[in-house]
Image (cartoon, rainbow, N blue to C red):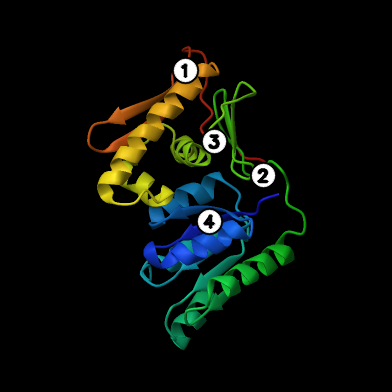
Amino acid sequence: MLPLLLVITRQVEATDLVRLELSAMGFKAYYVETLASASGVIAQWHFDAALIEADGIENDVFDVLKALRQRGQIPALAVLRRDDEEFVLNLLAAGASQVLSPSPSPRVIVAHLHRLIELARPRLLDDSASVQLGPLWLNPRKGVATVNGVDAGLTASEFELLLMLASEPGELVQREAIGKTLRFGTAAERRRSADMHVCRIRRKLKNVGGDNLQIVTVYRQGYLLKLVSEPQTSVSRVAWTV
């Protein structure tokens, strides 16, 4: 079963080698760049661990650690690319489970993450991070999206994009954020790829009866997912079970 990992970083390019190592070692990683984005997904999903690239988010890192503590003692590994003893001590005092510095290799980072998860959560539960919006159900660990129990047949990239939208139903997700998360090359390529992925997801959702799941295009900005239902039907934003 895939460990679900939250990665908080603003150094996207520097994280590429870590990204490849995480994927190779069986992690399901979700990447965010801002405190607001991190707080949103922390509140909605249950992660097995968090990896924080502390360089570049010095002003936010302590608030991130506080949010992780409030969510239930999620193990947090902070990584520094410089030797700063005082900052390391402050990170540990704020709640980081461990701090690696300076510039640890991707293999070392992943090995420490595995160990932190083993210590904090001996057994992972299958559906501990499911996301639900009406008839749509997504399991980030398995990479499976279903509508009324029918597999939507999404590719890995399509699943990641839909997961981003479903985690913030009714709220705008910027195309640039989608592109950076899914790593779609240049800015122009990111815009085109996001558009193509959205078209395919719309078609696949419709094919499995998800007509009341609408991905709305906000011109020149991005997309949002909303549930169109009968007046008496309540909308479940996100459901997760432990």
Q: Check whether the beta carbons of the residues at disc 2 and disc 4 lie within 8 A of each other.
A: no
Instruction: Determine whether 164 is above or below 107 in the image.
Output: above
Give the spatial CA distance, label 1 vs label 3: 16 Å
Q: Residues within 10 Å of mark 4 (few under 14, many from 20)?
A: many
Residue 216 coordinates in the image, percent (x, y): 34, 27
State left or right for residue 8 relative to residue 140.
left
Which mark is first along the chain, 2 or 3? 2
Question: Could you give the CA–CA distance between mark 2 and mark 4, rounded to whole angstroms?
Answer: 14 Å
Q: Mark number for residue 37?
A: none
Q: Distance between the residues labelled 1 and 2?
A: 26 Å
Q: Disc 3 versus disc 4: distance between alpha carbons?
A: 17 Å
Q: For numbered disc 4, what is the local secondary structure?
A: strand
For the residue marked with disc 2, what is the amino acid?
Ser
The quarter of the displayed image where residue 140 is located: top right
The amino acid marked with disc number 3 is Val
Say whether disc 1 or disc 2 marks the residue closer to the N-terminus: 2
Instruction: Report which quarter residue 218 is drawn in.
Output: top left
Q: What type is the residue that disc 4 sits on?
A: Leu
The residue that mark 3 highlights is 238
Name the residue that disc number 2 marks: 128
Mark 2 or 4 closer to N-term?
A: 4
Please name which of the two marks, 3 or 4, marks the residue nearer to the observer. 4
The reply to whether residue 178 is in sight is: yes
How many neighbours does mark 1 have within 10 angstroms: few (below 14), some (14-19), or many (20 or more)? some
Quarter holding the C terminus? top right
Of pointers 1 and 4, the one earlier in the residue sequence? 4
